[in-house]
Image (cartoon, rainbow, N blue to C red):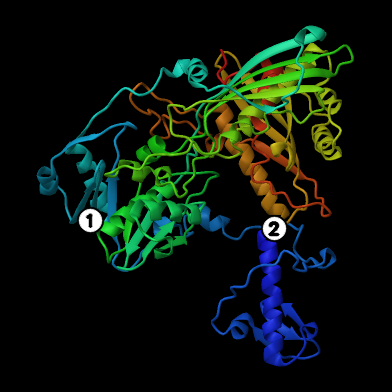
């Protein structure tokens, strides 16, 4: 919507400037395919002719007149992207492909352990083997080398590791005991919802408890991060694929002691994913190196191993639920206890949010725990329940964490919708009917019924099951209902995700093709979290360092997908980049139960 308002303001300004040039009123002009035309005349001006090399710097007024909906030409239609083929073929230009004049290359050495200290570095031995070395950069526990060419940088990175020695303290708890660890480390709970709720399990006909666990998961971007820095003696230029270049610039300014307006960040496409990745940290690497070696663009690329070890993961979570169903088949109470770490430690003025800054001399420390409340996102079910309470237990976890697609909603909806299925069964009610009996929001009802219609006539066979889940993202944004079909082979402990059906309501649809892409991508990412993904570690280090030790879905695992979008042009456009993520785990796990009778309480799915 910000882009829509800015575009409308730019349109008015262009018409105003053109009217001055042509000595006519703005009502005598129209915009047409990049030109401004005068009505009943062949005269026209290009935007460039109107602007004369100047940039529009006016403030966007909130009362700007938007285009009338009945005049839309593209909004609501399916407009396919024209860059997909280039991306698939490797023809698209990412930041990794930039070749700037005089560009040199660098590698930063990172240890395997968060709290390792650089004990020794044999620089003379390193220099005797390395080629093309232009400068060694050491600042505290930050160790890097700048060389002439990329291949020399790759070899130099290996030699840095060979000739350095780091401490390696034991820092991680036993992975099998994370739930216990979270409870021990958590502070007093915050009542996130239902402060005055009266929870009385004894007063209900059916009372049920269950515990659910979600592990640490990676962003797992397909291409390792990259950044370029160039200090020209006055301004520091940074090329980055960060999702938040302005907050990142503030962190860089603090880290380097520069004024923010002396840092120019150029946003460049990279291998993308939702959330806070190490793109900002690579930019911080490039910034430190550029200041140490001015006058040349310096390209920094991370290794796959470093990316897997050092990225800020999605927090592990523990959800303990309790609910009751009365004799009328309605929920009488609900209580959720959620244990979670922060779900956003994105860069800001606190330089400690940048990994690089923590290893300089002196080091910058994290002074904030970030956005904790993302952990109980969607923790209160979007159902009509007379007594509901959500308690959030925050802990400082052992692994680095930050925002990952949908924050805590994925874990909470996995728990809620799995629990709803089990409650429906205990009450001897149909899973769809049980949910519909607790929904009064017509738009929520509509997506549930749309999925019912999509799977009508589809029945599970032996060792095959259908499962269902629903959510309204954040309980205030887009709606999504989903059904999953799986086949299970208990003898092998294997699950095959056959197909996903999804119905989404994102309000006004801007690009139908784009929103379907977003929902499909969300389904695939969450399906991988559900069936495969888990960050593994021992007491010293992260052991998920490559695609063998950190499993993701492969092409052959891709399910068939059918997505229905309910367009509501009279409603606000709410976006759909994350709405398809939360219902996936519960839909799959509920399908697994129907296929083999095993409930799944801990992710990723492990059948036995």
Distance Cα–Cα, label 1 vs label 2:
45 Å
Q: Nearest to the eye among marks 1 and 2: give it.
A: 2
Whole-percent x and y of residue 526?
60, 34
Compared with residue 262, is residue 120 higher up or lower down, i.e. above or below?
above
Name the residue located 82 percent from the left edge and 27 percent from the top edge. Answer: 384
Q: Secondary structure at mark 1?
A: strand
Compared with residue 600, is residue 14 higher up or lower down, i.e. above or below?
below
Compared with residue 503, is residue 229 higher up or lower down, i.e. above or below?
below
* Residue 1: image tag: 2
Whole-percent x and y of residue 182?
50, 20
Name the residue located 71 percent from the left edge and 91 percent from the top edge. Answer: 43
Name the residue located 62 percent from the left edge and 72 percent from the top edge. Answer: 58
> Considering depth in this image, is 192 or 39 the residue closer to the camera?
192
Residue 461, visible in the rendered structure? no
When asked about the image quadrant of residue 167, the answer is top left
* Residue 147: image tag: 1
Residue 216 located left or right of residue 233: right
- Quadrant of the rendering where the C terminus is positioned: top right
Whole-percent x and y of residue 534?
49, 27
- Quadrant of the rendering where the N terminus is positioned: bottom right
């Amino acid at each position: 919507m910000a882009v829509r308002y800015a575009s409308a303001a730019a349109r008015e300004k262009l018409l105003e400037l053109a009217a001055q040039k042509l000595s006519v009123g703005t009502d005598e002009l129209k915009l047409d395919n990049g030109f401004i035309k005068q009505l009943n005349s062949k005269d026209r001006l290009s935007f460039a002719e109107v602007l004369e090399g100047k940039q529009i710097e006016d403030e966007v007024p909130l009362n700007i007149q938007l285009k009338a909906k009945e005049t839309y030409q593209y909004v609501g239609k399916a407009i396919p992207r024209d860059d997909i083929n280039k991306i698939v073929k490797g023809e698209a230009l990412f930041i990794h492909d930039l070749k700037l004049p005089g560009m040199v290359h660098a590698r930063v050495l990172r240890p395997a352990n968060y709290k390792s200290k650089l004990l020794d570095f044999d620089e003379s031995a390193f220099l005797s083997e390395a080629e093309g070395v232009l400068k060694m950069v050491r600042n505290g526990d930050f160790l890097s080398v700048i060389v002439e060419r990329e291949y020399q940088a790759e070899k130099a990175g290996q030699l840095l590791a060979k000739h350095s020695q780091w401490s390696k303290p034991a820092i991680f708890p036993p992975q099998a005991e994370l739930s216990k660890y979270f409870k021990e480390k958590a502070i007093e709970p915050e009542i996130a919802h239902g402060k005055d709720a009266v929870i009385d399990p004894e007063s209900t006909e059916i009372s049920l408890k269950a515990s659910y666990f979600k592990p640490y998961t990676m962003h797992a971007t397909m291409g390792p991060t990259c950044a370029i820095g160039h200090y020209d003696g006055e301004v520091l230029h940074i090329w980055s694929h960060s999702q938040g270049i302005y907050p990142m610039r503030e962190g860089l300014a603090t880290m380097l002691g520069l004024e923010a307006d002396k840092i120019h960040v150029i946003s460049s496409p990279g291998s993308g994913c939702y959330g806070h990745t190490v793109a900002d940290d690579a930019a911080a690497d490039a910034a430190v190196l550029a200041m140490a070696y001015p006058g040349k663009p310096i390209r920094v690329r991370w290794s796959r191993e470093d990316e897997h070890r050092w990225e800020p993961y999605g927090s592990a979570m523990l959800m303990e639920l309790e609910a009751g169903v009365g004799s009328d088949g309605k929920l009488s109470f609900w209580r959720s206890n959620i244990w979670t770490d922060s779900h956003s430690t994105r860069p800001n003025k606190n330089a400690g949010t940048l990994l690089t800054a923590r290893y300089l001399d002196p080091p910058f420390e994290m002074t904030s725990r970030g956005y904790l409340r993302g952990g109980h996102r969607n923790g209160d079910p979007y159902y009509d329940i007379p007594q509901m309470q959500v308690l959030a237990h925050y802990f400082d976890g052992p692994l680095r964490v930050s925002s990952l697609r949908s924050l805590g909603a994925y874990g909470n909806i996995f728990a809620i919708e799995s629990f709803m299925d089990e409650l429906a069964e205990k009450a001897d009610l149909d899973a769809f009917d049980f949910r519909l009996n607790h929904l009064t929001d017509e738009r929520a009802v509509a997506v549930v019924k749309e999925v019912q219609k999509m799977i009508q006539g589809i029945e599970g066979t032996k060792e095959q099951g259908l499962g269902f889940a629903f959510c309204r993202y954040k309980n205030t944004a887009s709606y999504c209902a989903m059904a999953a079909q799986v086949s299970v082979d208990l003898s092998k402990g294997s699950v095959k995700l056959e197909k996903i059906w999804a119905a989404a309501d994102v309000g006004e649809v801007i690009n139908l093709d784009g929103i379907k892409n977003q929902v499909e991508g969300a389904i695939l990412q969450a399906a991988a979290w559900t069936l495969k993904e888990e960050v593994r570690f021992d007491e010293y280090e992260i052991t998920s360092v490559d695609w063998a030790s950190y499993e993701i879905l492969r092409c052959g695992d891709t399910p068939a997908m059918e997505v229905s979008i309910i367009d509501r042009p009279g409603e606000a456009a709410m976006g759909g980049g994350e709405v398809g993520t939360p219902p996936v785990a519960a839909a799959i796990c509920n399908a697994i139960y129907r296929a083999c009778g095993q409930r799944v309480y801990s992710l990723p799915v492990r059948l036995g």
